[in-house]
């Protein structure tokens, strides 16, 4: 199987959320994908409500979104704290292809990139060359 080479930073679009060309950090140390959201609330109907509002990330449109929860799992964040995070199943566009993937929702306001692309998404599909960035842009221009 041919694997595409990607860089340590890439662009990803979350089709289901109308978020296009989000800056994402490719993180082989992270198990799963994570998306920055605000005001995350879980209701008793197994739905998660969150807001995509962030002045720094221009793709964010300020909408309040409700989605069914795929799973709630314990995640150890980069600072070592264990959090319970809801995750959702969404379609993304990455490197010119559409994928259905699981994304955990968390407040990443203190992080530079609104999206983290983790190992489960990368595995079997891509190889990461840490000397590269935004290979996606190069492929789109070609």
Image: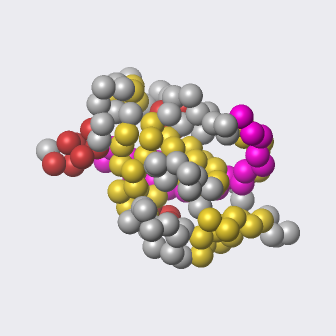
Q: Residue at x 64, y 54 (%)?
A: 106
Q: Tag count in the figure?
A: 0
Task: Point out residue 101 in the picture as x, y percentages from the top left corner.
Answer: 55, 47
Task: Point out residue 76 in the picture as x, y percentages from the top left corner.
Answer: 72, 37
Q: Residue furthest bottom?
A: 63
Q: Residue at x 67, y 68 (%)?
A: 39
Task: Point out residue 95 in the picture as x, y percentages from the top left corner.
Answer: 33, 44
Q: Residue 21's quadrant in the figure?
A: bottom left
Q: Quadrant of the N terminus?
A: top left
Q: Residue at x 40, y 55 (%)?
A: 22
Q: Residue at x 38, y 33 (%)?
A: 8
Instruction: Identify whether 20 is placed above or below 29.
Output: below
Q: Is residue 83 magenta?
A: yes
Task: Point out residue 97 in the picture as x, y percentages from the top left corner.
Answer: 36, 47
Q: Residue furthest left?
A: 142
- Does residue 115 show up? no
Magenta span: predominant SS is strand
What segment is highlighted magenta in the picture? Answer: 80-101
Instruction: Identify whether 82 is placed above or below 55.
Output: above
Q: Quadrant of the C terminus?
A: top left
Instruction: Identify whether 37 is placed above or below 32.
Output: below
Front one among 112 and 74: 112
Give the side of residue 140 with respect to residue 47, left or right.
Answer: left
Instruction: Identify whether 117 is placed above or below 110.
Output: above
Colour mode of the rendering: secondary structure
- Does residue 33 show up? yes
Q: Is residue 49 magenta?
A: no
């Amino acid at each position: 199987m041919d694997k595409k080479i990607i860089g340590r930073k890439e662009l990803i679009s979350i089709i289901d959320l109308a978020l296009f060309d989000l800056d994402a950090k490719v993180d082989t140390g992270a198990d799963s994908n994570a998306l920055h959201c605000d005001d995350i609330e879980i209701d008793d109907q197994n739905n998660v409500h969150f807001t995509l509002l962030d002045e720094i990330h221009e793709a964010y449109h300020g909408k309040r979104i409700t989605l069914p929860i795929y799973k709630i799992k314990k995640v150890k964040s980069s600072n070592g704290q264990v959090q319970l995070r809801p995750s959702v199943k969404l379609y993304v566009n990455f490197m010119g292809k559409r994928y259905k993937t699981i994304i955990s929702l968390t407040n990443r306001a203190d992080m530079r990139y609104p999206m983290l692309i983790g190992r489960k998404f990368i595995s079997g599909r891509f190889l990461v060359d840490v000397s590269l960035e935004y290979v996606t842009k190069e492929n789109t221009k070609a």
